[in-house]
Image (tube, rainbow, N blue to C red):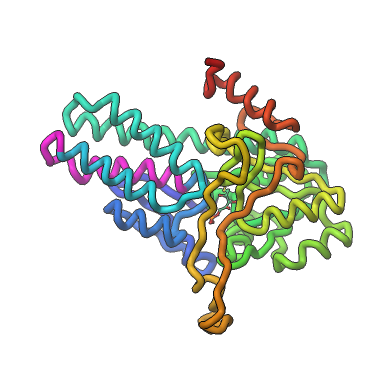
Amino acid sequence: MTFRTIDWTENKIRLIDQTALPGHSLYLNIETVEDLAEAICSLRVRGAPAIGIAAALGVALAANNHTDEPAEAFISSIRDAMDVLGRTRPTAVNLFWALNRMEQVLNQAAHLSPGEIRERLLQEALDILNEDRLICHQLGVHGAELIPDAANILTHCNAGALATSEYGTALAVIYEAVSQGKEIKVYADETRPLLQGARLTSWELNANGISVTVLCDSAAAFLMQRGEVDCVIVGADRIAANGDVANKVGTYMLSVLAEKHEIPFYVVAPVSSFDLSISSGSEIPIEQRDRSEVAAFMGRITVPEAVPVYNPAFDVTPNHLVTAIVTEKGVLTPPFELSIRKVLLEGGILSDA
Ligand code: MRU
């Protein structure tokens, strides 16, 4: 990779500001939880796994910034930080999964000194970061088995290295297929309204020497009709127990189109994206974002002020439109209710009790 998405350096969180891409590769040093919450809300750091990593590092940052406080105040400062971070974005379950891991460490270490608690929290956050690298690599290896040589792949939003610690989820499959010598051509939906496909996916693939063409979201149907798409590959922000998938708004539309054109539709996500506490996608909280993202373009107002805007950041693809879900444990096929449960049971992530 030619860049680092997120790191811990000199007691600060260092991240590439994704709002400045593709024009500028600007790195931010985040020193407070408030600045980190702002960075997550404004999508300076974004993508489900990266949000989880950022939140975990944010808890370590809070511990670092409050070590001098008496034990009780120290622990309550860390819990406050978890609350602040937990309120940033509602859809990506990886945020809550990572905060939950940090909370478990805090609970187990609560009797220790602030310095020792700080060390344990930092270690857990770094584990989450480093595990993600390995997981993304495994996603790539499993997913690449599904990709034929000379494939044209359509993707949506950015589920790449910028959305994770490294490699990505959907894009890890592409990086791996290319490294195996397959000739891959990527089509990246621009992904209105914040253009993660145009600004981020095309930037990172191009920076890594992979052929990529950007299209308006509304051109995807025509591209498929012309026979130019061999498969669709996307990431996920949360997957319900029945395999319904929340991902960037527009993903559902692609899944409907893929079915119509008999094109496989693959979702690539770590098992931390499964949320078995909800049975179907209708229960997934969908983030609604500000009207300004839709009502202005290139510095100009594009929607009359009196007219309301509908701006959900995500949508839900029903499980019957998903051909397979690629995880770090292997490729899951329908019926997803069973295959998801099985992979989590085998991985010891779920118990039968
Ligand atoms: O609003 P964003 O940019 O955080 O949305 C990101 C996506 O929808 C990604 O596809 C998803 O998080 C998977 S990232 C590996």
Outermost right residue: 226
The residue depicted at 56 percent of the width and 37 percent of the height is: 278
- At which x and y percent is residue 81? 29, 46
Q: Is residue 264 magenta?
A: no
Magenta region: which residues?
51-72
- At which x and y percent is residue 22? 54, 66
256 sits left or right of 293 in the view? right
Relative to 193, say whether 278 is above or below. Answer: above
Q: Which quadrant would residue 182 be assigned to in this image? A: top right
* Observer able to see residue 186: no
The residue depicted at 14 percent of the width and 34 percent of the height is: 71
* Observer able to see residue 286: yes
Q: Main secondary structure of the magenta part?
A: helix
307 sits left or right of 264 in the view? left
Instruction: Between residue 265 and residue 134, name the one nearer to us.
Output: 265
86 sits left or right of 135 in the view? left
Instruction: Between residue 339 and residue 205, name the one nearer to us.
Output: 339
Q: Is residue 67 magenta?
A: yes
Instruction: Between residue 127 and residue 24, name the one nearer to us.
Output: 127
- At which x and y percent is residue 125? 37, 37
Number of callouts = 0
- At which x and y percent is residue 115? 19, 33
Outermost top residue: 353
The residue depicted at 66 percent of the width and 45 percent of the height is: 175
Relative to 228, say whether 298 is above or below. Answer: below
Instruction: Between residue 164 and residue 265, name the one nearer to us.
Output: 265
The residue depicted at 57 percent of the width and 33 percent of the height is: 271
